Each structure stands twice: as structure tokens, then as C-alpha cells.
Amino acid sequence: YTHQLLFCPCTDTACAERRRQTIVPSCSYESVDKPNCITQMRICNADYVCRSRLAQFQYDCEPLETSANGCKQGNYGACLLAYTGLIGSTIIPNYVDNSTSSVAPWCSCSASGSMRLECDRFLGFFTDNICLKNALMMFETEPDQQSTLRQTSTPSHSRGENRSSTSQPETVETMSNILDAAIPTQVLGNELLVGHATLPSSGHPNSASSHSLMLEAAFHIVLLLLHLLSGQ
């Protein structure tokens, strides 16, 4: 139920505030003055984990107006999964009002100087991103769709008819199922992350682990040779 808590729809202020506090408590997140987004972005880029997760988010949630669903990659589930990967980083996004699709990191582009365009582009990836907005709204509307599906799949019986008109329930791959299925494969350490935004989230595993095994094997061979030489 993690994603239901993160993306649950809210229609009143109390619900929206509880949802915001679920992402991160305001006391540990919101300072008196908003920091500059360029500063937050530089801090993120200096950290391998944050930099890689930001790159993955920018790849999976890249908007495309001419796309049927607004996403260049066409995958709402991958977009939301990459979005949740930013939680806990210096650029952690959060809800700005009662709307499910209104999110932004706690930073501002004021006093950005010559970096204003870059700052606006970064902030706009959260505040004016049709792919991300559609993905968040799709998660919000799914409970109603599932409720309608359950009603239409209820067995119906007519008087005087011996045959059963029970219809088989359809199998629907919901956004929750997509996200929950992807979570076990998402490593939470540094091995998780893709170093470049040009790599798809469904790409081949990182070769860092195999490289480490090769180095470890070579190290043991060197130790064995030194032991044999010292014995002579």
C-alpha cells in the first residue's frame, strides 16, 4: 500500500496535508526561505545516487506533446517509479496543494541570474510536465475504474432462465500492480542506479557487480602466488 499512501487522491486540506507529511515532515524539509533550485541541483549532481535517480526520472518522465499519453517513453508506471526514487534526496518533490498532479521540489528560481533558464527548465520538469501529471492522475482515477469493473463483472441471473450469465472478470494491469511488481527489482543501494538519462529503466543490469567480482578473483590469485613464492 506504499504507493496508495503516496498518491492517494485528496479533496480537502486536511487530507492533502497528511499526504504531504507522508512524503516528508515539513520540519525536516521546509526552511524559512526556499533555497535556489540551481543550488539544490548542484548538490544532487555531486552525489552519485541522487544524480543517477534524477537522470532516470528525467528519462522515464520525459514529456512529449504528440504522444498519446504525453510521455515520450509511453510508460506511466516507469515514470511514477522513477519519481518515487527522488524521495529522500535534496530535490525531493512534494505536493504543493490539494491537487494530486501539483508537485514540486522545495526550491525557487528567484535570484538565479544567468542560470534562470536552466533553473526554470529544471523546475518546470515537475510543475509543467504533461507526462508526470498524467501518470499521477491515472493513479488517482484507477480506484473508480476498478470499482466499475467489479460491478460489470457481477453475475446476473434472470427468472425463468436455467443458464448462468456469469461473466468472467477481466484481467486489468493497474498502475498499482505495475509499481508493486517493479519494486522487488529496484535495488535501494548505489547498484540501483543508471548513470545516464539515455538508458531505459528496462535496460541491461549494470556491469559494476561483475567487474567487482573479477577484481576480487584477481586479488585472490595474486595472494596465492605471493604465498607460493614465500614458501619457496
Image (spheres, grey):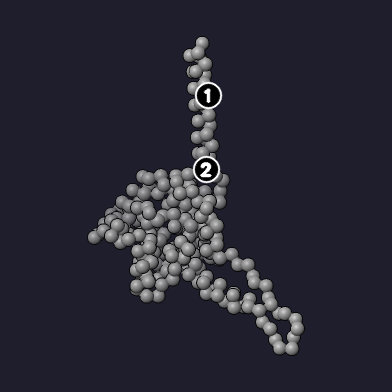
Q: Nearer the viewer, residue 230 or 207?
A: 230
In the rendering, at what x and y percent does residue 37 appear? 32, 55
Q: Residue furthest top?
A: 232
Between the residue at mark 2 and the residue at mark 1, the CA separation in whole angstroms equals 25 Å
Q: Residue furthest bottom?
A: 160
In the rendering, at what x and y percent does residue 112 appear? 29, 55
Q: Residue at x 59, y 78 (%)?
A: 151
Q: Amino acid at mark 1?
A: Ile
Provide the secondary structure element on which disc 2 rests: loop
Q: Is residue 209 above or below residue 202?
A: above
* Badge 2 or badge 1: first in the primary sequence: 2
Q: Return the residue at label 2.
A: 206
Provide the secondary structure element on which disc 1 rests: helix
In the rendering, at what x and y percent does residue 86 appear? 41, 55
Q: Which mark is residue 131?
A: none
Q: Residues within 10 Å of mark 1 (few under 14, many from 20)?
A: few
Q: Which mark is residue 221?
A: 1
Quadrant housing residue 153: bottom right
Q: Residue at x 38, y 63 (%)?
A: 22
Q: Residue at x 33, y 52 (%)?
A: 40
Q: Amino acid at mark 2?
A: Asn
Q: Nearer the viewer, residue 22 or 51?
A: 22
Between marks 2 and 1 in the image, the one whose residue lies nearer the viewer: 1
Going by the image, does 166 lie left or right of 17? right
